Image: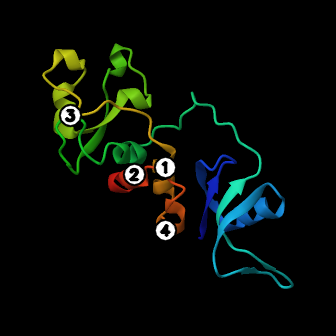
Amino acid sequence: MERVLVLNASYEPLNVCSLRRAHVLVWKGRAEIVESHTRPLRSACATFRRPHVIRLVTYVRIPRGVTRRISRRVLFARDDWQCAYCGSESHRLTLDHVVPRSRGGTSVWENVVTSCAPCNHRKGDRLLEETSMTLRKTPRPPTPVLFIRLTAEHIPDVWRRYLPGLEAAVAAA
């Protein structure tokens, strides 16, 4: 399935959609084509530009306090597929709450990290202050570029100029 990069009216990346959805948005006047393929879209009686990158005509406000649900795949990619405590790239990666749920910790991006099974077992139900363990970096919500990188199997070269921070996301995925 062909994918199209969707930009907000301010040119910030929003998401990736299907070619069909992108064409409908353009056809209805809700988006404009920023980059197109050399190959056109054809119907029985018409030819259209084939969108590669589209920009919404109206700005879509994204609430800053709202983040996407945590999934293991995105979490592991955010943490570079490495344990947040020891840095190992073990095949037995797990999800760990920095402040355990039994101690009032919640499942938010700032409290969840990738951990190898031995480190997760060693930390157990304790706070970091109660162990000799430290985090290699402070956990933060992932960038929108990481979600786009994980959604699209291949990032076309045309998209790269619209995706700041892509190189870090590519290395993580």
Q: Is mark 2 on a helix, strand or loop?
A: helix
Kind of residue sitting beneath label 3: Tyr
Q: What is the x, y in percent for residue 165?
A: 43, 49
Label 4 sits on residue:
157
In this rendering, would 116 be left or right of 37?
Answer: left
CA gap, disc 3 and disc 4: 35 Å
For marks 2 and 3, give the one nearer the viewer: 2
Kind of residue sitting beneath label 2: Ala
User: Which label sits on residue 169?
Assistant: 2
Q: Which of 26 and 124 is in front in this view?
A: 26
Label 3 sits on residue:
85
Q: Residue at x 16, y 26 (%)?
A: 133
Q: Is mark 1 on a helix, strand or loop?
A: helix
Marks 1 and 4 in Cβ contact (< 8 Å): no
In this rendering, would 67 be left or right of 111?
Answer: right
Label 1 sits on residue:
145
CA gap, disc 2 and disc 3: 20 Å
Q: State whether residue 19 appears in this view.
A: yes
CA gap, disc 1 and disc 2: 7 Å
